[in-house]
Image (spheres, grey):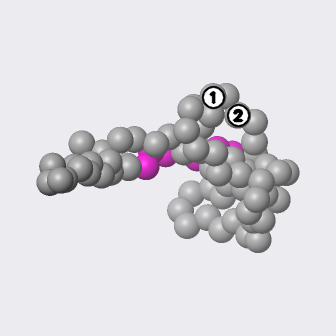
Amino acid sequence: MPLQLQVAFVAGSSGIWRIERITAVAGESLPPAERLAVIEGPEAQRPLAGSWILRAQRAIRAIQTEKSSRP
């Protein structure tokens, strides 16, 4: 069974990604923001501050390897 990695995309004034535009496809648009931070792991579940936050889970498949029993 795949492991689940928690991820949060936090829009605000800091982050490694620059937001060029926000366009609504349906309904109201998201509030404007300058930057987008991607936070993974336990930190993604903590309270975060931002213009808007998208939380998600990403599946991680564990790869098992067996050591050869040959000499």
- On whether residue 65 falls in the magenta region, the answer is no
Residue type pointed to by label 1 = Arg
> Magenta span covers which residues?
52-58
Q: How many tags in the picture? A: 2
25 shown above or below 67? below
Residue 52, percent across and down? 69, 45
Of the pair 5 and 32, the residue shown nearer to us: 5
Residue at the limit of the structure toward the right, as seen here = 13
Q: Which residue is mark 1?
A: 46
Work out how far the residue at label 1 is from the one at label 2, CA to CA, in angstroms: 6 Å
Residue beneath the point at 78% across and 65% down: 18
Q: Which mark is residue 30?
A: none
Q: Residues within 10 Å of mark 1 (few under 14, many from 20)?
A: few
Q: Quadrant of the N terminus?
A: top left
Residue 6, percent across and down? 50, 40
Circle 2 SS class: loop
Of the pair 29 and 51, the residue shown nearer to us: 51
Q: Is residue 14 left or right of residue 17?
A: right
Residue at the limit of the structure toward the front, as seen here = 71
Q: Which residue is mark 2?
A: 48
Residue 49, percent across and down? 75, 36
Q: Are marks 1 and 2 in contact (CB under 8 Å)?
A: yes
Residue 71, percent across and down? 17, 53
67 shown above or below 26? above
Residue type pointed to by label 2 = Leu
Residue beneath the point at 75% across and 42% down: 50
Residue at the limit of the structure toward the left, as seen here = 70
Circle 1 SS class: loop
Magenta span: helix, strand or loop, mainly? strand
